[in-house]
Image (spheres, helix red, strand yellow):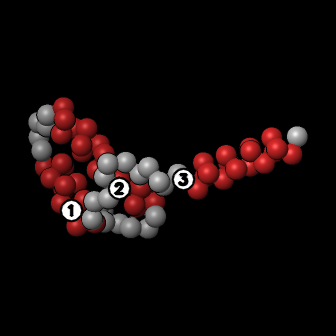
Amino acid sequence: MQKLYFTGLMAAILTIGGCDMFGGPAADIADADLRKKWRECKSISNPSRTKVLACENYERECSRRKGKGNLVCY
């Protein structure tokens, strides 16, 4: 029973601790570059499907950073 409890506890710790480990493709972009790409996305009137996906990633990363107090895109 203790082994099962320990395994569950370790799984929970790794899950919670690793939440930011896989931040997505835009997680490693510098603030200035992210802002530039985010603003570029806002100015495109008819984006391609690939560009839409990239812009969604930038928007998601901007929101993630905003949640951490970094207002790089706003």
Left or right: 61 as drawn, with respect to 9: left
Q: Residue at x 78, y 48 (%)?
A: 6
Kindly identify which residue carries mark 2. 27
Mark nearer the N terminus (2 vs 3): 3
Q: Residue at x 44, y 49 (%)?
A: 22
Instruction: Give SS at disc 2.
Output: loop
Name the spot of residue 58 as percent of width and height, x first.
28, 50
* Alpha carbons under labels 3 and 1: distance apart: 25 Å
Kindly identify which residue carries mark 3. 18
Pick out the residue farthest to the top.
49
Q: Amino acid at mark 3?
A: Gly
For the residues carrying marks 2 and 3, which lies nearer the camera in this image?
3
Q: Which mark is residue 13?
A: none
Instruction: Give SS at disc 1.
Output: helix
Residue 39 visible within the image: yes
Kindly identify which residue carries mark 1. 33
Quadrant (top left, top right, bottom left, bottom right) of the N terminus: top right
Q: Amino acid at mark 2?
A: Ala
Left or right: 6 as drawn, with respect to 20: right
Q: Are marks 3 and 1 in contact (CB under 8 Å)?
A: no
* Alpha carbons under labels 1 and 2: distance apart: 11 Å
Name the spot of residue 51 as percent of width and height, x first.
18, 39
Pick out the residue farthest to the right.
1
Mark nearer the N terminus (1 vs 2): 2
